[in-house]
Image: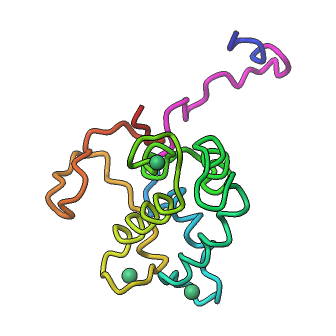
Amino acid sequence: MLLVSACAGHPDGHAGGPQGPGPRQVSGPVAPPTALLFTGFDENGDMFVSEAELHAGLNSAWPTFADGEHSTSTLSLDNWLERALGSADTELSPIAFDSNIDSVISRREFDVRFAAVFERLDKDENGELTRAELLFTPARASRQSSSQSGGRAREGRPRGRPQRQ
Ligand SMILES: [Ca+2]
Ligand SMILES: [Ca+2]
Ligand SMILES: [Ca+2]
């Protein structure tokens, strides 16, 4: 099934090539899906995302997808997250939001989850996110001990998109 396009044109055959199908090496910092969403909250354009801007952003986002004023279905949230993040994200998955596991996301659960993510990203704890704080520098291919940030013990995770399930 994967062979369908291989015989289409090119008699000189570009099959394979030196680069191969492996994952692309990323050497510099990258913006994770969360960063895409958070930078969009920077309403005054000063390149920082303050807590006030986060709340304002969540306030305006909520009615665009939620089924109700105070709660929403996980499906609606999931659809919105997909648009907002452009990719699945374990930290901002519907499951991560639903802290009481009732399959409904309350407005409070929504806010609490984002506040937690904001706090984690705000490394210097000054109440606003810089672009630098939103970036993520992938660990080198070599194994690194996670002694530095002391945060999540998730080393050995396969490269590529993070998935919990
Ligand atoms: Ca700002
Ligand atoms: Ca819930
Ligand atoms: Ca900060």
Q: Nearer the viewer, residue 74 or 142?
A: 74
> What residue is rendered at 43% in x and 60% in y?
113
Magenta stretch in the rendered image: 7-25
Res 59 visible: yes
> Looking at the rendering, in which quadrant would you find the N terminus?
top right
Residue 23 percent across, percent down from the top left? 49, 38
Left or right of 132 in this view: 157: left
Query: In front here: 32 or 24?
Result: 32
Residue 124 colored in magenta in the image = no
> For residue 63, which quarter of the picture?
bottom right
Q: Position of residue 25 (x, y in %)?
A: 46, 47
Q: Main secondary structure of the magenta part?
A: loop
Residue beneath the point at 46% across and 64% down: 114
Residue 4 horizontal/vertical position (percent): 77, 12
Query: Toward the viewer: 94 or 134?
Result: 94
114 above or below 94?
A: below
Q: Position of residue 140 (x, y in %)?
A: 31, 52
Looking at the image, residue 5 sits to the left or right of residue 108; the answer is: right
Q: Ligand 3: which quarter?
A: bottom left
Does 133 appear above or below 16? Answer: below
